[in-house]
Image: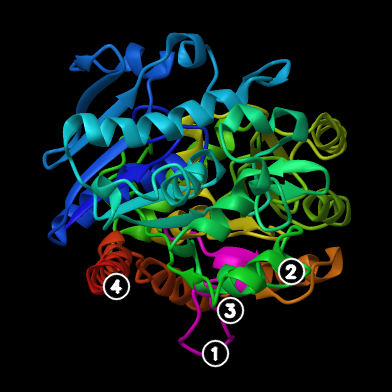
Amino acid sequence: MKVLFCSSEVFPFAKTGGLADVCGTLPPEIAQCGAEVKVIMPLYREVRKKTKDLEEIDETVSRAMLSDDVEILFVRNDDYYDRAGLYGDENGDFPDNLMRFQFFNRQVLKTLKMLDWQADIIHCHDWHAALIPVYLKTKHKDDKFFRDTRTVLTIHNLAFQGLFPKDQYPLLGLPDELYSEEGFQYYDQINLLKAGIIYSDEVTTVSPQYATEIQTEEYGCGLDGVIQKYRKGVVGILNGLDYHYWNPAKDPFIAKHYDRDSVISGKAETKAVLQREMGLPVDIDRPVFGYVGRLSHQKGMDLVVDALSALQGDNVQVVIQGLGTQQYQDELSELRNEMPDRLGICFSYNERLAHTIYAGSDWFLMPSNFEPCGLAQMISMHYGTPPIVYRTGGLADTVESFQLDEANGNGLVFQEYTTDALLQAVRLAEEIFRDKRQYFSLVANAMHTLFPWRESAMKYFELYRCLRLESQEV
């Protein structure tokens, strides 16, 4: 079976978020299941700078190796991709993003024909690759080369849909009738993700709970009706975690390596380093609540800011690392001035500090109001830092609330998206932390909770296999 992954970003070549992690880690695991796998993405300036073994196939395509058995292809167009950013710059999104990604989608199909590599499955990720299913069922519907090719579209975050002004529709090179309610039309705009949902052979997303949520008005981001009308359902396959990279026993960024047997001493030493680095008093008995992520409403920063104001009298410390809206940065800066011995902030992303927060915190805050899957809670659990989460999306699939005097649970889960609910969870965390027997029982549970990519890969492989069988029966 031949499988092609199409993504706008792939780690370690170019990354702005979790999409790159998935598309850098999942393809080698699919290959281990027995498929022949290739990956394709745009040749950004960033890729050229960091890829020494780039081999030019022709003027439009280059290649390198993602892993020992997975080749990655790069679509070249210097006018479109030789820029400082992937999707935009300090002035916002690039105004020609529709042209940039329609070119990428077209070149994916041209590249397959040029290489004479007939993919059984083209796995498209997010709106950036959502035109491929459309082109296959319109411009290439009579092309024998793609007769048995089937498409999978994975939605990593339904909030990002690829919306463009309707007057740009001719740039797609598609019939006028496809700009309709049964195609690209969406409230007087072009919606690439909507068209991909309609035309792909299978739609998946990155957790079972999120697959259910996006079919509701609350979480459907305006596309719940489209999903209900055109799909029999959405397949939810939980993302995994790269345990070779996220491993406290070997992590080069943390002060003290540790595993399940040495977690108490290892975390204590790293906690002291974290407190010093964030300008906080070193106090092993004071619980540290860590946060790594965007400072945004989606990530629950409104709850965090409100809760911090109420926690000024509690004997806790909070460390926050992330970039976000100026409003949240201003509010957090003001709170830091009010509680300098309790709140440490870094308004930038630093890989070493992020690892130190995961390892050195006693609790990890992740109160997202929606979360398709989430990796941070998986990381924090593996580092022995129980997460505190709102019950939504992938957080609901991965975190089970700890019950006092019971052996189950790997974190704390609050059921209502309110500041009071978060505060109750934080104060329960303080209570558990004071009872070291209870706390380290929870830590042990968290560290024993694993989400290997191999399990996810096997589910995708079975999905591919079923689609391939269907194509052979036609």
Secondary structure of the residue carrying numbered label 1: loop
Dots 2, 4 in contact, CB < 8 A: no
Q: Which residues are magenta?
A: 383-412
The amino acid at mark 4 is Glu
Q: Earlier in the sequence, mark 1 or mark 4?
A: 1
Dots 4, 3 in contact, CB < 8 A: no
Question: Magenta region's main secondary structure?
Answer: loop
Q: Earlier in the sequence, mark 3 or mark 2?
A: 3
Report the residue marked by disc 3.
Answer: 401
In the image: residue 271, left or right of residue 72: right
148 or 85, nearer to the observer:
148
Q: Quadrant of the C terminus?
A: bottom left
Instruction: In the rendered structure, find residue 470 and report the number of the disc placed on it.
Output: 4
Secondary structure of the residue carrying numbered label 2: helix
Callout 3: few (<14), some (14-19), or many (20+) C-alpha neighbours within 10 Å? some
The amino acid at mark 2 is Arg
* Mark 1 and mark 3: Cα distance apart in space: 13 Å
Report the residue marked by disc 2.
Answer: 427
> Residue 212 placed where, x, y %?
60, 75
The quarter of the displayed image where residue 105 is located:
top left
* Mark 4 and mark 3: Cα distance apart in space: 41 Å
Can residue 287 be seen here?
no
* Mark 2 and mark 1: Cα distance apart in space: 17 Å
Instruction: In the rendered structure, find residue 3 and report the number of the disc placed on it.
Output: none
Q: Earlier in the sequence, mark 2 or mark 4?
A: 2
Report the residue marked by disc 1.
Answer: 405
Secondary structure of the residue carrying numbered label 3: loop
Comparing labels 1 and 4, the label whose residue is closer to the camera: 4
Callout 2: few (<14), some (14-19), or many (20+) C-alpha neighbours within 10 Å? some
Considering every residue shown, the one lying at the far front of the view is: 142
245 or 117, nearer to the observer:
117
